[in-house]
Amino acid sequence: MTIALLGAGVMGGTLAAALVRSGHDPDQLVLSDRVVERAEKVATERGTRYAEPAEAVAGADVVVLAVKPQDMEALVGQIRDHVRPEALVISIAAGISTGFLERRLPEGTSVVRVMPNTPALVDQGMSAMSPGRHCTDEHLARARALMEHVGRVIVLDEQHQDAVTAISGSGPSYIFYVVEAMIEAGVLLGLPRDTATELVVQTLYGAATMIRETGEHPTVLREQVSSPGGTSVAALRALEDHKVRAAFLTAMEAAANRSAELSPREE
């Protein structure tokens, strides 16, 4: 199966690396990018081929569109006459709907929209995918298998993709923000920065593992830590006083709204 990866940025490069690690034949992987030097660099590092977009898709069974939303229309214009009739087109660009692509690609093209996230860099990504009107079960399974190389995958209706973008797509940035704040607190309280970092990172990893492995609701797990009159209750009271929960809700609403704004407006 030949895969054309159009876009050699963070996610495109991550997918290329994951596919090669999983045993995909590098000769069956073709990279392209608007910045030619970047594509050539990633292709050299991964042992894959490089080609211009039109040439890359001409022989591809799967075409992955991994460019910025504002670059999508120009890219699709370059490749539309070269996409094979039976090819699967996967978009991982925020705000780009399957309908947007279907209207610009040859009639009947199978399209899948995917929102991944950056933990894909360490094969712990979360991808949510939505099939387009012409997507077959076989093509959806192929898209799922591709994204499972970099983490977990769920399938859901496209109407939920803005919410997905706000939760898992942008989610790592919120976690990194909290981790950064906790490390700074540790330094403020007198700990060496490397010690504070190790304490925070392992605590985060352990807490996430508990949620996944116990199956308990986070509220239950939080209450188990929060002894009456104890330190955790004092800290949580301070967070509530500063309306941290409300701030998270507002922030994620803003992310979802921005995702919707990124969707190109049709004439």
Image (cartoon, grey):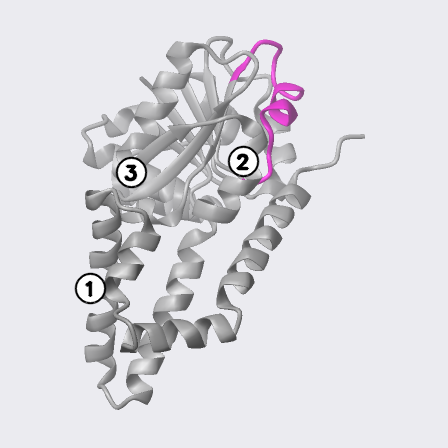
Near mark 2 (Cα within 10 A), the count class, few <14, some 14-19 or many ≥20, is: many
Q: Is residue 230 magenta?
A: no
Q: Position of residue 213 (x, y in %)?
A: 19, 44
Task: Find residue 151 and name its label.
Answer: 3
Compared with residue 131, is residue 267 higher up or lower down, i.e. above or below?
below
In this rendered view, identify the residue nearer to me: 87 or 191.
Answer: 191
Number of numbered discs overlaid on the protein picture? 3
Q: Looking at the rendering, which quadrant does residue 95 occupy?
A: top right
Q: Which residues are magenta?
A: 94-110
Residue at which label 1 appears? 202
Sequence-wise, the earlier of marks 1 and 3 is 3
Marks 1 and 3: which is nearer the front? 1
Report how far apart the C-alphas of labels 1 and 3 lie in the structure: 20 Å
Quarter of the image with the C terminus in it: top right
SS class of the residue under badge 2? helix
What residue type is disc 3 on?
Answer: Gly
Q: Which residue is mark 2?
A: 161
Query: In terms of secondary structure, where does tag 3 sit?
Result: strand
Horizontal and vertical percent for residue 91?
50, 31
Percent x, y of residue 219: 34, 54
- Mark 1 packing: few (<14 Cα in 10 Å), some, or many (20+)? few
Q: Nearer the viewer, residue 31 or 206?
A: 206
Residue drawn at the location 36% of the way across and 76% of the way down:
235
Image coords of residue 84 (percent x, y): 49, 12
Circles 1 and 3: CB atoms closer than 8 Å: no
Q: Amino acid at mark 1?
A: Gln
Q: Is residue 104 magenta?
A: yes
